[in-house]
Image (cartoon, grey):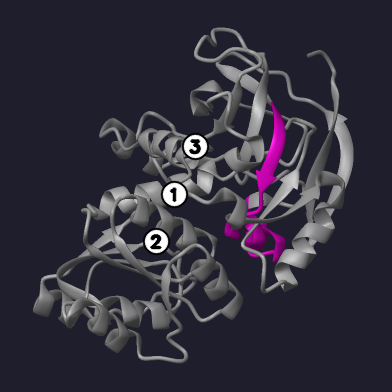
Amino acid sequence: MNDLTITAAYYRGDKSFAVEETTAQQPGPGEASVRIAYCGICGTDMHVYHGNMDARVGLNRIIGHEMSGIVEALGYGVDSVMVGQKVVVRPLDHCGDCPACDAGHFHICHKLKFLGLDTDGAMQNIWTVPAHTLHVLPDDLRMDHAALIEPVAVACHDVRLSGLRAGENVVVIGGGPIGILVAMVARDAGGSVVVSEVNPNRLAIAQKLGFDTVNPAAADLQAAINARTGNKGADVVFEVSGTQAGVDAMTAVAATRARIVMVAIHAQKPQIDLFQFFWRELRLIGARVYEPEDYEKAISIILSGGVDADTVITDVTPLAEIQKAFEELDSSPTAMKSLIKVGDEA
């Protein structure tokens, strides 16, 4: 893979991308180069687009991490994958020498590098990454569906940490891409799921996916959940809205000894009704990114159809039109998950 010319999309600041030709990075020892097929646009990418992360990513960054691809080349010492295999990247590079890493919690390393933010990412034809981040895919998994594995792994991590048991009542507060994926993974685990969302287009998608829904702007969410649960409340609550209203709702709908999982990243510190934690013996669980087992679970649940990938993926745009894709996603109230088609791999 000597001096291979590729196409890459560079974030330049001020809501702009420049699609340019560059030279592919050669894989060094312990690294692998992946020819990218698809890359999803996530909420963090939109924060970059809006300029909220310029201090972190700069104005010359190739972003993107929700991807699928095929191994193109291997660096010295890599024997965990083979050239030609379908893969996804778990975009976390840990230091291996901090208290979190020493405890085995590599995904929350004190010096964690998130690939595609702290390094260049997948919005380019060939992406060179540490080989330890790769997960091999089954041959029969579609590459566009595989681009959902990263966000589905987030949902798998959230549901796993919740300790959800079959038959329990679940409320997902926020029906955006991650909220919908959390709802599907929770349903696959046997939960009886209600999705709370105010956006009518997202409500329609949730209903199309077969979920019971409540619009808290039009109905009393607490009363609706009590009516569905015999006044018990939800055994597990996922806060995915990132809003104060969502934080208020998460304690209001919780059953005695419910588990509340904080999924959303809040821009400002929310106010939390701590009295309810005392009164009902609630538990609040923080959930950040994912671990290797969550990736493997995500692969299996997509392959089995537990996640309806065709409904979740609402649009696909070629890399050359990445600017248009971000602009439309920024203004469109109907999109759920937007993909960038980076390469020709099917």
From this viewpoint, is residue 35 visible?
yes
Q: Please, what is the three-letter code of the amino acid marked with disc 3?
A: Leu
Q: Is residue 337 left or right of residue 248?
A: right
Kindly identify the residue that appears in the image at 64 percent across and 57 percent down: 55
Secondary element at tag 3: helix
Q: Is residue 252 left or right of residue 327?
A: left
Where is residue 39? Give x, y as percent.
67, 43
Please determine whether, in this image, residue 125 is positioned above or below residue 153: above
Bounds of the magenta segment: 35-56
Estimate the spatial distance between the alpha carbons at disc 2 and disc 1, rounded to whole Å.
9 Å
**Image quarter hosting the C terminus:** top right
Task: Evaluate if marks 2 and 1 touch, with contact meaning CB atoms under 8 Å apart.
Answer: yes
Q: Is residue 220 left or right of residue 231?
A: right
Disc with the residue nearer the chain's start (2 vs 1): 1
**Image quarter hosting the N terminus:** top right
- Callout 1: few (<14), some (14-19), or many (20+) C-alpha neighbours within 10 Å? many
Kindly identify the residue that appears in the image at 39 percent across and 52 percent down: 185
Disc with the residue nearer the chain's start (2 vs 3): 2
Q: Please, what is the three-letter code of the amino acid marked with disc 2?
A: Val
| Residue that carries the numbered disc 2 in the rendered image | 263
Q: Nearer the viewer, residue 28 or 55?
A: 28
Q: Nearer the viewer, residue 305 or 87?
A: 305
Q: Is residue 95 magenta?
A: no
Disc with the residue nearer the chain's start (1 vs 3): 1
| Residue that carries the numbered disc 1 in the rendered image | 154
Please determine whether, in this image, residue 88 is positioned above or below residue 12: above
| Residue that carries the numbered disc 3 in the rendered image | 303
Where is residue 287? Give x, y as percent.
35, 54
Where is residue 80? Give x, y as percent.
50, 14
User: Which one is in front in this view, the residue at disc 1 or the one at disc 3?
Assistant: 3
